[in-house]
Structures are given as C-alpha cells and as structure tokens.
Amino acid sequence: MRPCMADHNFSGNEAPFAWKNPNNIPSNKDEVTHLELLKKYNIPYIFDIHCHFFPEVVLKAIWKWFDKVNWKITYRYKEEKRLDSLNRNNFKKFTTLNYAHKPKMAENLNKWVYENYKNWKGAIPFGTFYPEENVLSYTQKAVEEYNFKGFKLHCEVSKLNLNIPELKSTFTYLEKKQIPIVIHTGTAPLPGEFTGIKYFEPFIKTYPELLVIVAHMGAHEVFPYANLINKFPNLYLDTTMAFVDFLATGEDMDSLIPLLETHKTKIMYGSDFPNIPYNLSHSVESLLNANISMDAKQNIFYRNAERLIGDGE
C-alpha cells in the first residue's frame, strides 16, 4: 500500500495513520511467533498473494516516501535478508507485485522480474502494465514468453481509470487467458482520482469473466466490493493490511471478520511485505486468532491461492 499524497503535506513528526491501540503497538522486530499457530490449524505454509518486489533504487524511493509519514518499515533490509525473512516465517510462496506510474516503466519492471525471479525461492512471477501504445504486446510477452502468472495494477499511484479504452484489448486478452490481476482500486488510505467502487463496478461488468483480486479488501468500501463476489465468480479479495492494528485502511476492521467466513473460498491472505510497519507475525496471528473456522483459515492462507495460481510452474 502506497498512497499518492502529492497534495497532502505532512510534517516529519506527524503520523497521518493511526494505531488501533497506540499504547500497545505490535513489534517491528522479525520475531516469527506464529509458527505454532500454523501447526495448530494444519496450515503447512503461507501463500502470500500480495508481496512486493522492486529494483532496489525504486524500493528506496518508496521507503523515502514512507519516511515522510512516519511509516516505519520493519523489513528495511537488503534483498537477500528480505528473502530469508519470508522463508523463516514459512512464506513458501509469494507474488512479485510492482506497478508503474509512467510510460515505459511497466515493460522494464516486467523484464527485471523475469531476469531475477528464479533467484527468489518461492516467487510466483507477476508483472504489471500501463496505458501506452505497446501495452498489449508486452503483456502478451509477459504471459507467453516470461510465463508470468498474474499482474498488479495500482489505480491510485498510477492514476489509472480501469475503464479507459486504451486498455480494452489488454483486459480482454487477460480475461480470455484467465490470468489474474491484483488491483488496488479501493479508496484507502486516501482516495485517488480513479479509485472506488464507482469506477470498479462498471469495469468488472465490462469484463465479467476476468480474474480479479481486489487488494486490501476494497477498503474503505469493503461491503460494496464483497457484495460483488456473488455476482462475479472470478472476483476475489485479499486481506492485505486490513485486519491489523495499523489502521492504514482508515478503519477498524473487526466488524468485518464475519466476511472471512461467508466468503472463505474467495479471500486470500496478503502481507504487503516488505512495506509494513510491524512484523509478519502480527498480520498472520490477527487472522489465525480471528473467530472463523479452521477451514476458512486454511483457505485464506494457502488453499485459495493454490486453486487460482498453483505453484507457478
């Protein structure tokens, strides 16, 4: 989650995002305290549908932005150590999400992922795309030559209207190929020019068979997005930064926990690693300790992603 806040000025000491309990903030040390809970609920490993990989120079720029809003990155490590943290936390499978905010960037990011992902044990290669002249050709290349298993779009950062005609052929291609797209389309933590259900609903109606995973449970409009699940069989949600004590979604999500049971076959775990201000155990334990069935927990943490994507081979 990285909101565009160019029009929002925050002082270096101001924290625009609140903690659920400021007097009891989760640890930002990689303590790996959730492994016994995974065993308790017969979850052999975690499949993280929302994990970020960027070239180091881009990642450092993203972290610099977070520094300005007192968003303290727990996993501010070199790539090798970040990969070690994923392994230690039993994150055996994870996506390689990134996104572009200008022309030519997406194609270069895709090439970078392709050239590197086999060095990241457990990585499921995902790419991105951006509205530009050759978008369909490099998206096809990512699928047919690079063997990418999905894509990521960020409507806020990219200032992307999903309904523009420039992307029609690309979305139609991915719909036909049944290639999933993780989309940050929600209005949390702050609305973008083209975020929200008012843009997403006409989009999904245009491409009703498209495989879409709405990031962050669609916050701030969780119920409107959840209500679409019954209408569109290929629509999913991810839990990224939703059920945690850091309220980047802008709301306390406890009242929405029943949705995890109701839609247990359509929700997947996401972490937003490495750009989180707490350790991985916190987001995992928050869900494992939730009042939902073992079946729901197993589905959310690995089964649903396996059914949709598999091992990437």
Image (cartoon, helix red, strand yellow):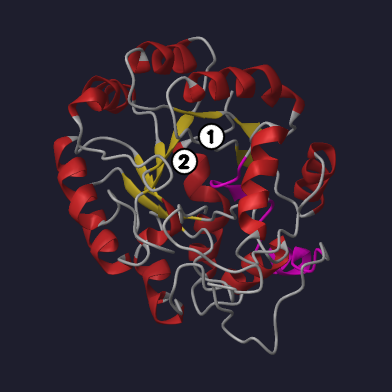
Q: Front-most of 287 and 185?
A: 185
Q: Position of residue 275 (x, y in %)?
A: 64, 53
Does the CB distance between marks 2 and 1 fall below 8 Å?
Answer: yes
Quick one: label 1, few (<14), some, or many (20+) residues within 10 Å? some
Q: Front-most of 305 and 103?
A: 103
**Looking at the rendering, which quadrant does residue 267 occupy?**
bottom left
Q: Identify the magenta region.
A: 32-52
Q: Is residue 93 visible?
A: no
Question: In this rendering, would 126 be left or right of 193?
Answer: right
Quick one: label 2, few (<14), some, or many (20+) residues within 10 Å? few
Q: Is residue 158 visible?
A: yes
Residue 310 got which mark? Answer: 1
Dominant secondary structure of the magenta stretch?
loop
Q: Is residue 51 magenta?
A: yes
- Measure the alpha-carbon separation of dots 2 and 1: 6 Å
Question: In this rendering, would 287 be left or right of 72?
Answer: left
